[in-house]
Image (tube, helix red, strand yellow):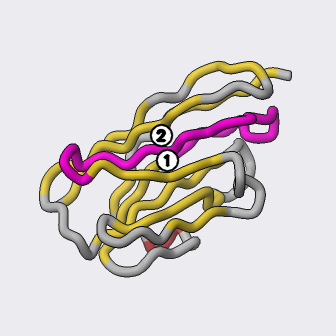
Amino acid sequence: QVQVVDSGGGLVQAGGSLRLSCAASGQTFSSYAMGWFRQTPGKEREFVAATRWSGDNTYYADSVKGRFTISRDNAKNTVYLQMNSLKPEDTAVYYCAVRIGVVSVFPDLYTNWGQGTQVTVSS
């Protein structure tokens, strides 16, 4: 069973940057996919970015493409989400999640979730 712990959120002004971390422990395999999602009150969880433990493919929501970068450090079993040029509409609770298999934009297909980390962007 894989456990994930996400961290790195905070309060930042519009135009600023934050880096979120997702540390995985337990069984980790090259066949796992890691995703970042976000959620605001009253809305469904929204796909942000994803990658796999193996390979170089990365995937982004159109709303963050060019501003956010997902990367990983396999030696540390950690995935990062570098967020630049932040906007007030990026304010949300951000969650890291894992699943076995290919990347998906659907949160229901991910099996293990972090506890979430709050990102607040002030205007």
Name the spot of residue 14 as percent of width and height, x first: 79, 26
Residue under label 2, please give it. 116
Residue toward you, 34 or 72: 72
Whether the residues at callouts 2 and 1 have beta carbons within 8 Å, the answer is yes
Query: In terms of image quadrants, where is residue 16?
Result: top right
Which amino acid, mark 1?
Tyr
- Which label is found at residue 69? none
Side (left or right) of 30 relative to 42: left
Name the spot of residue 42 as percent of width and height, x first: 74, 48
Q: Secondary structure at mark 1?
A: strand
Side (left or right) of 2 relative to 67: left
Name the spot of residue 117 as percent of width and height, x first: 50, 34
Name the spot of residue 123 as percent of width and height, x first: 86, 22
Q: Report crowding for label 1: few under 14, some 14 to 19, many 20 or more residues within 10 A (C-alpha).
A: many
- Work out which residue is located at the far right of the displayed protein and give it: 123
Work out whether mark 2 precedes mark 1 in sequence or the reverse, and give the earlier one: 1
Q: Residue at x 48, y 36 (%)?
A: 20
Side (left or right) of 81 relative to 67: left
Residue 93 among those drawn in magenta: yes
- Work out which residue is located at the far front of the displayed protein and give it: 56
Side (left or right) of 19 relative to 83: left
Residue toward you, 93 or 67: 67
Residue 72 among those drawn in magenta: no
- Work out which residue is located at the far bottom of the displayed protein and give it: 101
Q: How many marks?
A: 2
Which amino acid, mark 2?
Gly
Q: Quadrant of the N terminus?
A: bottom left
Q: Residue at x 80, y 40 (%)?
A: 89
Residue under label 1, please give it. 95
Region of the chain picked out in magenta, as a range? 74-95
